[in-house]
C-alpha cells in the first residue's frame, strides 16, 4: 500500500518519536537512583479439605413366602338304611257253604235245641259252642259266656258271630254271600269237631246246619310281605373333609433387614486458614522524590507511546502492511514498559531499540512512498 507524502510531512509524528525516545532515555538514567526492594504479597485464605459425604440406605435380603392352607382328603359318605326281607303271608281261614242271612233264630236255621260243636285254635283250649232258641253260649277253660238274641232280622247272626269271635285267637264274620267265615288271628290251625251229647241230649250236630264240616284246617300262604329285618350302612357318595393345616411355599420376597452407611460423594469443608503468596511488588524504600519522579516519567513515556500509535494509525491507515507492522511495533513498546511492572535498564534498552526501528521504518516509508523498505529493515 502506498502512503501519501503529505501524511509523512506532518511534523507531529517525528516529534512524537523524538519525545518518546527522550522520555525512555531519561527513565533509564533514573533506574539506579531509587532504593527499591521486592516484597512478597500475601493474603490469608480459608483452607479447605475434601472429606467423604456419607448417607444411609436400607439393606435387603430374600426370604421364602409361605401360605397356610387346609389339608383335605376325600372320604366316603354313608347313611343308615333299613334292610328288608320278603316274608310269606299265611292265613288259616274256613268258610261255610250255607247262606245264614235269612234266619231269625237257631231254630229257623234248623238247629236243634242245645245243638253244639267244638272249635280249637292251634294248641289252645277247645271251646264248646251251643245253640238254644234265644242264646249262643261259648264255654272255654271252664267259663261260659251267653250271647242272647231275639227273633228278629239279623239278631241271631250277630249273636252267633260275636260268640265265635269270643274264642281266643278266632275271628268270625259273615261274607257278602252270608256264609260263615272263621279265621285264626295268627294263622294257627283251626279244628272243628262234634261234641258228644250228654245223657238225655238228643240234639243233632250243628256243623252241617252252619255249612261247616268237622276237621282241621291248616294255614295257607296267601302272598308275601316285605318287612324290615335290620339296617345297613350304604355309601351314598364322597365328601372332602379338612384333616389339618399345612404351610406351603408359594414364592419369595425381598425384605428390609437393616441399613448401611455408604459414601455418596465428597464435600469441601473448612480446615483452618493459611497464608498464600499472591505475587510480588517493588517497594520504594527511599524518602526522596526520585521514585515519584521516575513513576511520573514512566507514565508520561507510556502516554507518549499511546499518542504516537494513534497518530501513526491515523496517518498510515489500517489496510496497509507497513502501517500495520509499525503500529504493532509501537504497541510492543507499551507492553515492555507496562503500567506497574518494575523497570530495568534492559527493559528500557529494548524499548528504545524498538522505538528506533519503528521510527526508521516510518521515515523510510514516508520518503519512498511505499512499504517495501520497511519490510526489509524491520
Image (spheres, rainbow, N blue to C red):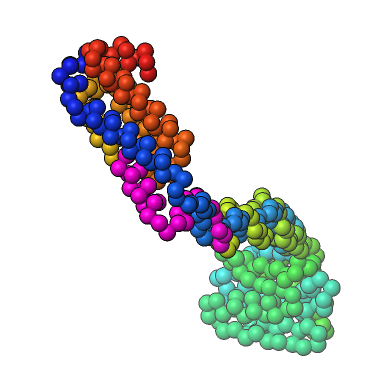
84 and 254: which one is in front? 254
Measured along the vertical axis of the image, is residue 357 above or below residue 287? above
Percent of width and height locating residue 127: 78, 79
At 75% from the left and 72% from the top, the residue drawn is 205
Q: Quadrant of residue 204?
A: bottom right
At 45% from the left and 56% from the top, the residue drawn is 286
Image quadrant containing the C terminus: top left
Q: In which quarter of the image is residue 235?
A: bottom right
103 and 128: which one is in front? 128
Report whether 352 appears left or right of 79.
left
Percent of width and height locating residue 54: 60, 58
161 and 205: which one is in front? 161
Percent of width and height locating residue 3: 21, 16
Identify the magenta region. Answer: 273-301
Q: Is residue 48 visible?
A: yes
Report whether 159 appears left or right of 16.
right
Image quadrant containing the N terminus: top left
- Is residue 290 covered in magenta? yes
Q: Is residue 78 visible?
A: no
Report whether 178 appears left or right of 33.
right
Percent of width and height locating residue 276: 54, 55
Residue farthest right in this picture: 123
Q: In which quarter of the image is residue 197?
A: bottom right
67 and 289: which one is in front? 289
Measured along the vertical axis of the image, is residue 266 above or below residue 143? above
- Is residue 310 covered in magenta? no
How many numbered circles are shown? 0
At 67% from the left and 80% from the top, the residue drawn is 163
At 48% from the left and 51% from the top, the residue drawn is 36
Amino acid at each position: 500500500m502506498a502512503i501519501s507524502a503529505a501524511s509523512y510531512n506532518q511534523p507531529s509524528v517525528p516529534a512524537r518519536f523524538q519525545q518518546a525516545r527522550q522520555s525512555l532515555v531519561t527513565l533509564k538514567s533514573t533506574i539506579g537512583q531509587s532504593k527499591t526492594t521486592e516484597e512478597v504479597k500475601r493474603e490469608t485464605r480459608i483452607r479447605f479439605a475434601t472429606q467423604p459425604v456419607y448417607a444411609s440406605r436400607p439393606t435387603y435380603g430374600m426370604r421364602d413366602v409361605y401360605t397356610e392352607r387346609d389339608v383335605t382328603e376325600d372320604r366316603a359318605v354313608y347313611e343308615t338304611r333299613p334292610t328288608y326281607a320278603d316274608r310269606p303271608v299265611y292265613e288259616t281261614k274256613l268258610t261255610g257253604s250255607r247262606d245264614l242271612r235269612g234266619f231269625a233264630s237257631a231254630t229257623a236255621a234248623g238247629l236243634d235245641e242245645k245243638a253244639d260243636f267244638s272249635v280249637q285254635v292251634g294248641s289252645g283250649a277247645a271251646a264248646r259252642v251251643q245253640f238254644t232258641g234265644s242264646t249262643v253260649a261259648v264255654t272255654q277253660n271252664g267259663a261260659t259266656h251267653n250271647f242272647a238274641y231275639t227273633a228278629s232280622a239279623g239278631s241271631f247272626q250277630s249273636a252267633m258271630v260275636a260268640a265265635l269271635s269270643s274264642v281266643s285267637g278266632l275271628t268270625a264274620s259273615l261274607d257278602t254271600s252270608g256264609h260263615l267265615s272263621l279265621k285264626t288271628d295268627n294263622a294257627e290251625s283251626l279244628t272243628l269237631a262234634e261234641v258228644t251229647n250228654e245223657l238225655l241230649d238228643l240234639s243233632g250236630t250243628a256243623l252241617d246246619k252252619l255249612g261247616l264240616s268237622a276237621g282241621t284246617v291248616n294255614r295257607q300262604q296267601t302272598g308275601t310281605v316285605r318287612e324290615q329285618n335290620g339296617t345297613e350302612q350304604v355309601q351314598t357318595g364322597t365328601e372332602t373333609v379338612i384333616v389339618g393345616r399345612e404351610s406351603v411355599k408359594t414364592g419369595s420376597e425381598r425384605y428390609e433387614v437393616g441399613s448401611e452407611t455408604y459414601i455418596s460423594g465428597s464435600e469441601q469443608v473448612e480446615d483452618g486458614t493459611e497464608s498464600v503468596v499472591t505475587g510480588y511488588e517493588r517497594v520504594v524504600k527511599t524518602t526522596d522524590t526520585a521514585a515519584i519522579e521516575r513513576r511520573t516519567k514512566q507514565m508520561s513515556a507510556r502516554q507518549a507511546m499511546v499518542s504516537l500509535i494513534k497518530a501513526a494509525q491515523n496517518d498510515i491507515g489500517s489496510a496497509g502492511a507497513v502501517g500495520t507492522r509499525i503500529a504493532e511495533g509501537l504497541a510492543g513498546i507499551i507492553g515492555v514498559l507496562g503500567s506497574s511492572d518494575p523497570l530495568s535498564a534492559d527493559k528500557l534498552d529494548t524499548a528504545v531499540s524498538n522505538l528506533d526501528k519503528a521510527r526508521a521504518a516510518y521515515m523510510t516509508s514516508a520518503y519512498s512512498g511505499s512499504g517495501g523498505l520497511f519490510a526489509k529493515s524491520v
